[in-house]
Amino acid sequence: MVKVCGMTRSQDIRTCINLGVNLLGFIFHPKSPRNTNPQDVPDLSGSPVRKVGVFVNQGAEEIARIMDTAKLDLAQLHGDHTVEACRTLGASRVIKVFWPMRYEQMDDLCRDMDRFAPVCTAFLLDAGIQSGGHGTSLDFTTLQGMAPPRPWILAGGLGPANITHALQCEPDGVDLNSGVESAPGIKDAEAIKQVMRIIRPDANP
Ligand SMILES: O=C(O)c1ccccc1N[C@@H]1O[C@H](COP(=O)(O)O)[C@@H](O)[C@H]1O
């Protein structure tokens, strides 16, 4: 599963759909250079891609309203959202973000994942200790052998230069953002193509 996040331009959306990207991310965080308005998210019904909203500070009610307006399939909760907030949004609609660098022990991260598993459909593991879009990466070797109780997506500065190494920790999906941009919010089609060729060589010769 491949997610490309931080969509702000229709030509980037078309490129991703043509390359077989599965999830497109739209960021609803006013401080982000990739911030977008719910009204500007295009209707992509009829294409196989699913739309994900990325939220940092909004509560469950506001997120639900934005999801309705922008017709989003999933909410990526990139803030300190609680189990209750996830439950309110509905487990089948929630991707919960975890920051492994917050935890001294892997066991503590696993305990938190177990707590959230019943109220999420997937997890996303990002670098840093809060928010996102930093362009920094996790130490992939520390994630090898992890078996989270939900499908998990690896994020954090992923692009053509490090995707092969990143795949060694066998995530269920990868999230591409600043690592495939020529400027914040401006995707680099060639970089996305390069990553897709590595991940799915048969589909992208
Ligand atoms: O991209 C942003 O500006 C952003 C802002 C606030 C929260 C999340 C954001 N992006 C998400 O962060 C991760 C990692 O991004 P990067 O590869 O390090 O640029 C990814 O899931 C983005 O969707």
Image: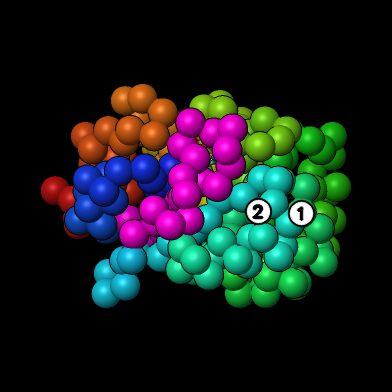
Placement of 112 over or under 128, stated as above or below: below
Q: CB of residue at label 2: within 8 Å of ligand 1? A: no
102 to the left or right of 41: right
Q: On the rendered image, what quadrant is the N terminus found in? A: bottom left
161 to the left or right of 29: left
53 to the left or right of 125: left
**Which element carries disc 2, helix, strand or loop?**
strand
Q: Residue at x 77, y 64 (%)?
A: 85
Residue that numbered label 1 is attached to: 81
Q: Residue at x 75, y 72 (%)?
A: 87
Q: Which mark is drawn over residue 199?
A: none
Q: Nearer the viewer, residue 82 or 192?
A: 82
Please check the rendered image and state whether residue 27 is part of the magenta-colored stretch, yes or no.
yes
Q: In the displayed image of the protein, which residue is found farthest to the left?
A: 205
Badge 1 density bin: few <14, some 14–19, many ≥20, Cα 10 Å = some
Amino acid carrying mark 1 in the image: His
Hey, which quadrant is residue 91 in on the image? bottom right
Magenta residues, start to end? 21-42
Q: Is residue 88 visible?
A: yes
**Which element carries disc 1, helix, strand or loop?**
loop
Image quadrant of ligand 1 equals top right
Residue that numbered label 2 is attached to: 77
Q: Residue at x 39, y 53 (%)?
A: 40
Q: Nearer the viewer, residue 168 or 186?
A: 186
Q: Residue at x 84, y 34 (%)?
A: 104
